[in-house]
Amino acid sequence: MIPINHIIGLGLIIFVIGLFGVLFRKNLMIILMAVELMLNGVNIILAGIGYHFKSPIGSIFAVFVIMIAVAEAAVGFALALSYFRHKSTYDLDEISELKG
Amino acid sequence: MILNAIFYFFAALSIICGIMVILQKNVMHSVLYLAFTVLAIAGVFFTVQAEFLGAVQILVYAGGIVVLYLFVIIIVNLSDILKEKRKFFPKLFIIGISIVFLLEAAYLILKNQFPVKTGVESGLDIKTFADVLLSKYIIPFEIASILLLAVLIGAIIIAKRKLLHDSD
């Protein structure tokens, strides 16, 4: 039996790595990847809680989180592509105006 | 004991590759490290007896999302990506806020003992999972399918080069 504290700690570390990437990097692609890392950390915590409580509900919530992650990735890529056609850059400092 | 060893191996692998994802200069290297991270996290799911979740992770993340990243990066031109620079004070602020968040959450987790409650749905096998997902959580399941349809249509419309009512 793996200790629950270690599983949640692993998920937390992955989440903080993703948070650091979102705040620190300026490339839009790497920021989207860091968001995926954050969602993966949440999934680890949910699966670990389900393992600890011997309940399938943790895995069920993690499946919903994966669905949301796929939706976010698809819409994020569409927005990134359409913005790249306007500005020809992925730097977030250039993407600072609302008018397309 | 061997299960714990496998868990710690995959945990270390996912942490190292996750750090490499956000530290790489080249976007393509980041995507490859993201694939490693996702597969290591699938290994973690297998060790905590979430087999369905691990299979979905390999199918959807490693087979779908990472390939989507590769396609988007291949489509655009990589040569005109600028160098990133941040000033010292925002850098310090970002590192500080990450560390403060990590310490606070680690304190709360180490303080809590996570007592096991009884009386919830028990069992970690696929059959219990499917029974609960398709009976108690059937309405969120169907709403998620509607969400995926809306995302499909919306992504096509946003990424289209010209709108439908344009002349050419």
Image (cartoon, rainbow, N blue to C red):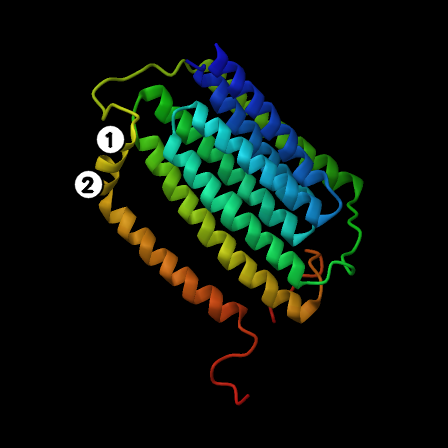
Q: Position of residue B151 (x, y in %)?
A: 42, 60
Q: Quadrant of the C terminus of chain B?
A: bottom right
Q: Residue at x 55, y 19 (%)?
A: B8
Q: Quadrant of residue A37?
A: top right
Q: Amino acid at mark 1?
A: Thr
Q: Residue at x 61, y 27 (%)?
A: B13
Distance (Cα) linking label 2 and label 1:
11 Å
Q: Position of residue B11 (x, y in %)?
A: 56, 24
> Is residue B138 left or right of B160 when viewed as pictured?
left
**A20 or B66, which is in the foreground?**
B66
Q: Are marks 2 and 1 in contact (CB under 8 Å)?
A: no
To which residue does mark 2 refer?
A: B135
To which residue does mark 1 refer?
A: B128
Q: Quadrant of residue B78?
A: bottom right
Label 2 crowd bin: few (<14), some (14–19), many (20+), radius 10 Å: few
Between discs 2 and 1, the one toward the N terminus: 1
> Is residue B132 left or right of B152 when viewed as pictured?
left
Q: Position of residue A44 (x, y in %)?
A: 46, 30
Label 1 crowd bin: few (<14), some (14–19), many (20+), radius 10 Å: some
